[in-house]
Amino acid sequence: MIRINDLNRRWKEFTLMDIDLHVNEGEYFVILGPSGAGKTLLLEVIAGFHSPDSGEIFFGRKNITDLPPEKRNVAFVYQNYSLFPHLNVLKNIEFGMRMKGTKDRARIEKIAEYLNISHLLHRNTYTLSGGEKQRIAIARSLVTEPDVMLLDEPLSALDPRAQDTGRKILKKIHTDSRLTVIHVTHDQTEARVMADRIAVMMNGRIVQVDTPEKLFNRPIDDKIAHFLGVENVLKGTVTANDDGVTLIEVDGTIIEAISDYAVGDVVYACLRPENVTLSKMRIKTSARNIFEGEIIESEILGALVRVKMDCGFILNAFVTRQSAEELEVKTGSHFIASFKTTAVHVVL
Amino acid sequence: MKILTITSIFAVLLIVFSGIGCVDNTDNADETQSESGAENFEKTTTETQDIKVLKIFHAGSLSIPFEELEIKFEELHPGVDVQREPSGSAKCVRMITELGREADILASADYNLIPTMMMPDFADWYVAFAKNQIVLAYTDDSKYSDEINQDNWYEILRRPDVVYGFSNPNDDPCGYRSQMVTQLAETYYNDDQIYDDIMAANVAMTASADNDTYLITVPASEAINPNTNKVMVRSMEVELSAALEAGEIDYFYIYRSVAVQHGFKFIELPSQIDLSSIQYADTYKKVQLQMGDGTVVIGTPIVYGVTIPKNAPQPDLAVDFVEFLLGEEGQKVFNENGQPPIVPAITNNLESVPQELVPLLTE
Amino acid sequence: MKKIPSRERLKKAVKADPLMVSFSFLALLLLLFVFLTLSYMIIVQVTSDFPGLIAATKNESVIKSINLSMYAGLLATVASFLVGVPAAYILARKEFFGKHVVESVLDIPVVVPHTVAGIALLTIFGSRGLLGGPLESYIQFRDALPGIVIAMLFVSAPFLTNSAREGFQNIDPRIENAARSLGAPLWKTFLLITLPIASRHLLIGSIMCWARAISEFGAVVMIAYYPMVGPTLIYERFISYGLSESRPIAVLLILVTLTIFIAVRLLSAGWRIYDTD
């Protein structure tokens, strides 16, 4: 659907270098990278706000490299949503239609209902919450029936609760419409949870493109591994929820966490490696999650040692170098890993 | 960095306060002399206590000679700061009579303004001290500048493509004198259409004859309604100099002194009409002009007048300056600037002028 | 609630926020300085010579000159708008070599003495000037309405340009990008999005520009003494007749312009300042 060939662009302190990218029709494609990597610039080049210094962009078979943004039929949603402050919600949503000379009130109402913003249509934009603004920005871009949806950090400006809702909405739209989506973020969890495929971008270059599983399991070099970290993102199914205390089955093992997801939900349990404690034998601890496993890999990272364990699922942990020596951490040895319920962050 | 900041703050404060020092002082000098005396001011300024300010309001056409006199006077009187404010003569007078401004000396381009506008409330006497004459100034770029002379100037001004300027008779003595000169030209050149063609046809001013005297009537300034394709009217004669230099006008009526000081070429008009000569005072008298506010002025030789207003803050210093102005040094300066001094200077009343000036005057 | 004596309250305020209290005092000085100067003149006129003020409102040349000031000021404001808004937009959006020079040049009229500006304009727009010469057979600037407008434009345009620029700078370029990807071409984006969002800044800039134009004397009188604008007439009346004849016109000019400014401010008070979001 979208093909970018050998694209270069330099703008202010940002650079895009030799970008080659292919996004499939209907794909949810995430560009993941640290801030300053040039992700937003790439998105703006695709939208046509910047023209590349060299290289080509194709939508399907059509070369759109020199097409102005208004003729590309892309929807662009910014981190701050960029609603038009002088227009009310309805007029914001209508804007794209007005520009195309069409007026389809029914479609607006349908989309408004779909995004649950029908009650907001006659409000002024400055009275809205972040989540509402996001939904309106999405509605505004959907009414123009775009070929591609470009999302620039669409969730970063929201509080955690609204982020959950936002993620759900984006997923729902994508599932229902099979729209091609390019989503830019610096948040690995977000990328992993949302993406069909992820492109990692660092210092203006695309360094790896892969499915989330492959990417997180097999980063092609240490820089990418370092950026991705070794965060534990464990896919599982909720098997019980007792007033917030949630049991999640991950590869046959049960993890306990706090969340309000219902039984049967497929969720991701996220856990930072520094929150995992290693010990030789079972010790008294308040931690509810205690697993025995075999060390399959260990790597020294400065003052820390990264330990990869197989506890029925793969678990990454950090220990200090000193305790690694004292505990005699090495591949093949068995350890007890424990972490608290509250250390697990569950996302859908 | 820090040192730099502190130093610059210090420097700014220093500049600000040194400025206040000066200003304070002038106030101080003014106020201690006036009845409303300000005792507390005297203590605040100690170092520069002895600097006295001499304030002069004078006609714009006196700017250059007075500037030279200022420098020389300050050399002779260390500790005196002469401050001059040039503007239109009428405005100078009104600043004193209407706006309550105080000046030590008032010098007008028409001595007559002093008796008519300032006496008896603001002055008792005046001294007529220098003369001038009206000329027609031009530059090499002026149309027909190679043809014009004393005999055909009014023919040149009549030509449709020539643009000329004069100042507003209501605002500026040079302005009403320009009207008088044009009217006097009719008799001298024996052509009774000169005023009509040059002035009346282009501005809402009229001339009427009664026996052998003429009365020019000028409406209120806003009603002068000049034909701007042909003539350029400005409040002050000095504003027209810029217009001549810019090529906006070809000729303008101006004092000889101003033309000399600006380096303009000029046509000298016959002394029978150019208001320069006391010899022709009787001829000049035949033209009168009524200004917009009803004031009537009579054609007189152009004579500069000076007075010390009654409310002058520094009357003694003012006398020193007038003495210097009327003396040899002053005469020399005026000669060099094309404004011949009257020697001895003439006063209206020898009894009321300051004693020090009497030897230099005649009644 | 217990009633606190005002002296106590002041003491408390000084203790709580001495900076704001002392700044408020200084601000009050500035306010009084401006307000007293103008209101005193108006009050003196109204109390001591009210018939004079009435007479001024009925005097044809007074009304004519005030009308001319406002009309020429309006033309100058429209002209400032047409050339100043695009300049302001470029300065707000683009970085380019020599931008500081351009900015300084556009601000020069604010610092040049106005009589000097008038003389400079005369040498450009005079009948033998750089532009006035070639244009002589089509348009006359000297002592004519175009000259008045040109002089007003010169001194007042920076007020509009600077305010417009501030307005544009406050608009997130991403809003314009959003409009473009929704199908709006450059021109429509500017007219339908950028301009309306900056409207309050543009309005305030226009009022400032118009006010400056109406009150302009120094530059106007050099290039166009006639036809007389309000400030020139005030000056003329002062020279010919003195304070008693010039003050009623001055007061009238102040009252008329104040009325208009207050009216425009009230009408636009409902407008939101979008760019502070």
Image (cartoon, coloured by chain):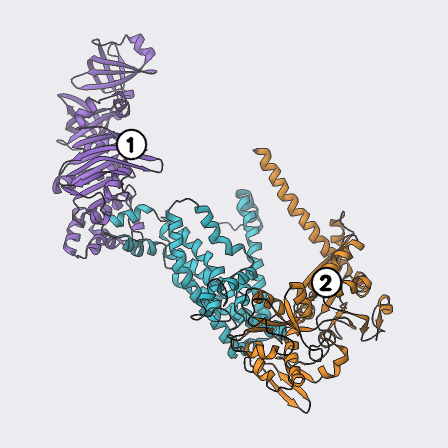
Chain colours: A purple, B orange, C cyan
Alpha-carbon distance for marks 1 and 2?
74 Å
Which structural element holds mark 1? loop
> Is residue C118 shown above or below A134?
below
Out of C146 and C89, give the one closest to the viewer: C146
Confirm or deny contact between disc 1 and disc 2 (CB under 8 A): no
Which structural element holds mark 2? helix
Q: Residue A146's x, y, as percent?
A: 17, 46
In the rendered image, the quadrant that contains the C terminus of chain B is: bottom right
Residue C169 visible to an observer of this rendering:
no
Specify the subunit that label 1 lies on.
A
Asked if residue C51 lies left or right of residue C182, the reply is right
Asked if residue B236 lies left or right of residue B277, the reply is left
The disc placed on residue B239 is: none
Q: Which residue is mark 1?
A: A204
The disc placed on residue B65 is: 2
Out of C43 and A195, give the one closest to the viewer: A195
Specify the subunit that label 2 lies on.
B
Mark 1: which amino acid?
Gly
Across the whole image, how many numbered discs are drawn on residues? 2
Out of A162 and B131, give the one closest to the viewer: B131
Out of B304 and A103, give the one closest to the viewer: B304
Q: Residue A138's x, y, as percent?
A: 22, 45
